[in-house]
Image: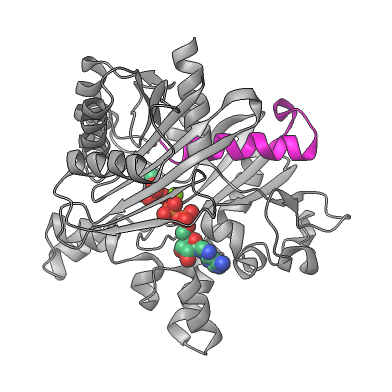
Amino acid sequence: MSTVLVVNSGSSSLKYQLIDLDGGDDRRLASGLIERIGHDDARAVHTTTAHPDGAPFTVDAPVADHDAAFAMMLEAFEQHGPSLAEHAPVAVGHRVVQGGARFVEPTVITELVKINIDELAVLAPLHNPANLAGIVAAQRAFPEVPHVAVFDTAFHQTMPPAAYTYAIDREVAERHRVRRYGFHGTSHRYVSRAAAEFLDEPVEELRMIVLHLGNGASACAVDGGRSVETSMGMTPLEGLVMGTRSGDLDPAVLVHLQRRAGLDVDGIDRLLNSRSGILGLSGHADMRDLESAREAGDEAAALAFEVYAHRIRSYVGAYAAQLGRVDAIVFTAGVGENSASVREAALEGLEGFGVEIDDARNRERRGGARRISTDASRTAVLVVPTDEELEIARQTLATVEA
Ligand SMILES: Nc1ncnc2c1ncn2[C@@H]1O[C@H](COP(=O)(O)OP(=O)(O)O)[C@@H](O)[C@H]1O
Ligand SMILES: CC(=O)OP(=O)(O)O
Ligand SMILES: [Mg+2]
């Protein structure tokens, strides 16, 4: 039996998937999302292949905390299947966002590991406390099996010091562990390997740029299967323009706003993490809404779209220079997999560098990995769907079987 429960616990949400990895043929048995934990209008959606038509089940009811969310999840399995007695998970895999410089691999969760995850919350105040709450609740719900933490940062621990070091006072940086850690590593790892498989080449011989464009977004230069540079930094705020996050900006802007706009530290934190990005520029955090507004002639939406694409292009150029050669540029996550116009705009004008998108291939709507570059393009441009949960399940199983 190789069934793994994967848990992605956010501050107000719980996402889960039950995955059966047996026989090499991956099988997703159930998935669910419980949103607005802590609010009266919480909602749970449970989808299961145990049900003949696969339709999702929805429950609207208050959910007090993560313990209550797990109880609700168990209830959904009980009522709608599949039976957890029949498909008992052999392990639970948890997404943990910040593993610092300490965690370079998936790790079986002990009391000491929990203390470390808690302590690392200093470096990820929005994410680690929620991840830990999920772990504690999940251990209560599944006390018999091992729990494994899979860190967003782990894949990027191969970055060289020149890439992860910020040019500030060394002592201050060391004391407060200020450096680039990088995030979305589980996705960058999975996608770079899937891209190599699609190209039918060993990942060790490929140099690629992976563009994970979801709500959060990051670019990663992958050399021979290892991350050598990535756009997110000490926190998931640096780099590309995101749904609600600014990405790069002159750090002096923060000083200026504190002095002149009457914003305190928390106000700035909220501004840059929650009220910036395409939301701040256009009023739309969702790329679909932004695209509709742009098509309807909204100028703020048009500018937000341009800024978004411009930033991606800058990173592609920078990472091409760092890699020295680019065999593939790979788009993934919600925006990367679905938005032909973002892909087109981001790589526009790069023909001189051997990057040429085929318009018809780019516009084609179909699942799975696919090539969207012309046959003449020196660099292959691919769309490769990410699957962070499957990757977490595989790493979790490999860790408990090791
Ligand atoms: N068909 C589509 N066209 C454009 N953008 C899309 C489409 N489908 C999803 N997206 C965008 O993908 C983003 C969410 O990506 P996703 O990877 O699901 O995010 P996350 O996992 O970080 O919550 C949203 O901005 C959404 O608008
Ligand atoms: C780390 C991070 O930014 O994650 P997400 O894209 O899920 O917000
Ligand atoms: Mg995501």
Q: Residue at x 44, y 60 (%)?
A: 241
Residue 226 image point, x, y percent: 59, 28
Taking the image as shown, residue 390 lies to the left or right of residue 353, namely left
Q: Nearer the viewer, residue 294 or 40?
A: 40
Q: Nearer the viewer, residue 105 or 72?
A: 72
Residue 368 image point, x, y percent: 69, 49
**Outermost residue, right side:** 376
| Figure check: 89 above or below 209 | above
Question: Quadrant of residue 200 in the image?
Answer: top right
| Figure check: 110 above or below 236 | above
Q: Residue at x 55, y 32 (%)?
A: 227
- Which residues make up the magenta segment? 180-207
| Figure check: 285 above or below 328 | below
Residue 216 visible somewhere in the drawing? no
Taking the image as shown, residue 387 lies to the left or right of residue 94, namely right
**Outermost residue, top side:** 402
Residue 374 image point, x, y percent: 84, 58
Question: Quadrant of residue 150 in the image?
Answer: top left
